[in-house]
Image: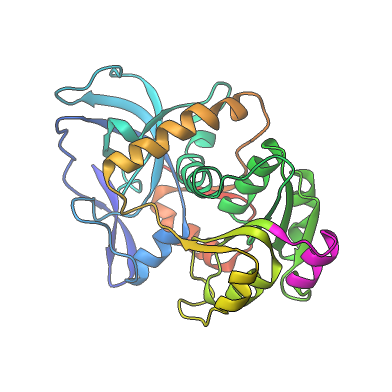
């Protein structure tokens, strides 16, 4: 088969060995794989795959099952699926533990389905499973125009929350169309002041942050009493001071998570939660895939260049 190989921080579409199907796994012939920031970091040498994962980038895919390993029940050759991966999505075939498979939502193409597993599992595991976002609460999403952001905005609205988001000004109209009540230009506006003004001084109950250190103090200042901050990215750095007094006064919580290196059993639990709680919202049209552009898999370098520019809105997809 062919896959995207990383050599000297460059991406090459090369012939590699086929994956072997093991007990509890299936082989998926990949139709599409979406681009994520983690893929860029892996190419740059900052985010190696966990032990046992393929060396090729790609944290999600869609396609058709072509082989079923020993002990697998409930899945069959020819079945259309999408999947959460520890790596290997930038390839023609990938081995997937059955606990990380998801059905293709009714009415969606395989291209659209490829955009869902990583963002759905990331957002659900943090905003719903960890932070317990409730109807009527305020959710602040940083990086609203990203794949994570466009999904989080829609999911927050579908769950009955008031959603605020930061993004470049050129993306605001589309974010409001997805349901955001307030859009903040992070390049020109003070997001803390904007959030406090919009909420009457209360602040945001849940903050989903892809920026990291640069936004930590602002997130604490923008937090509501009993609020929850979850950091899932470090685009703005990894080290910052935390004003514990201010956090304690608000009875607030700061946590950080990653998805890729979680044990398979934990990933399977997250995938099951997404299937049970998020897939019905997609089937009902309340949450929709947002595809910015597709590229042939061999042009993964150009796709990652677009990702690094932050000029995209939603997901960038690679096609085999």
Quadrant of the rendered structure where residue 182 is?
bottom right
Q: Is residue 128 magenta?
A: no
Instruction: Point out residue 273 in the picture as x, y percentages from the top left corner.
Output: 46, 33
Q: Which residue is drawn at the image coordinates 60% and 29% (left, top)?
A: 282
Residue extending furthest toward the bottom: 241
The foreground one among 40 and 13 is 40
Instruction: Point out residue 168 in the picture as x, y percentages from the top left corner.
Output: 72, 65
- Reply above or below: 295 against 250: above
Stretch of the chain drawn in magenta:
192-204
Q: Is residue 197 magenta?
A: yes
Instruction: Point out residue 152 in the picture as x, y percentages from the top left corner.
Output: 61, 47
Q: Is residue 190 visible?
A: yes
Q: Is residue 242 left or right of residue 250?
A: left
Q: Is residue 100 left or right of residue 139?
A: left
- Reply above or below: 15 against 74: below
Instruction: Point out residue 308 in the picture as x, y percentages from the top left corner.
Output: 53, 67
The foreground one among 237 and 127 is 127
Looking at the rendering, in which quadrant would you find the C terminus? Answer: top left
């Amino acid at each position: 088969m062919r896959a995207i190989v990383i050599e000297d921080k460059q991406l090459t579409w090369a012939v590699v060995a086929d994956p072997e199907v093991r007990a509890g796994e299936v082989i998926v012939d990949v139709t599409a794989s979406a681009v994520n920031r983690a893929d860029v970091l892996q190419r740059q040498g900052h985010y190696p795959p966990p032990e046992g994962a393929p060396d090729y980038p790609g944290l999600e895919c869609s396609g058709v099952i072509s082989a079923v390993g020993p002990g697998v029940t409930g899945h069959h050759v020819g079945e259309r699926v999408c999947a959460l991966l520890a790596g290997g999505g930038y390839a023609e075939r990938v081995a997937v533990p059955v606990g990380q498979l998801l059905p293709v939502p009714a009415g969606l193409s395989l291209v659209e389905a490829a955009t869902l597993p990583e963002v759905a599992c990331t957002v659900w595991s943090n905003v719903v499973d960890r932070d317990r976002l409730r109807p009527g609460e305020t959710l602040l999403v940083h990086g609203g125009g990203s794949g994570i952001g466009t999904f989080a905005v829609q999911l927050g609205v579908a769950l009955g929350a008031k959603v605020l988001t930061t993004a470049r000004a050129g993306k605001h109209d589309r974010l409001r169309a997805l349901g955001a009540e307030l859009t903040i230009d992070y390049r020109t506006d003070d997001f803390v002041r904007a959030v406090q003004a919009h909420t009457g001084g209360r602040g945001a109950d849940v903050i989903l942050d892809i920026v990291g250190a640069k936004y930590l103090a602002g997130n604490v200042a923008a937090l509501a009493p009993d609020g929850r901050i979850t950091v899932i990215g470090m685009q703005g750095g990894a080290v910052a001071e935390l004003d514990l007094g201010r956090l304690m006064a608000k009875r607030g919580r700061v946590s950080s998570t990653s998805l890729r290196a979680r044990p398979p059993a934990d990933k399977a639990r997250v995938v099951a939660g997404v299937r049970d709680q998020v897939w019905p919202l997609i089937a009902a049209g309340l949450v929709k895939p947002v595809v910015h552009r597709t590229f042939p898999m061999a042009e993964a370098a150009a796709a990652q260049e677009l990702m690094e520019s932050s000029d995209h809105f939603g997901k960038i997809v690679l096609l085999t």
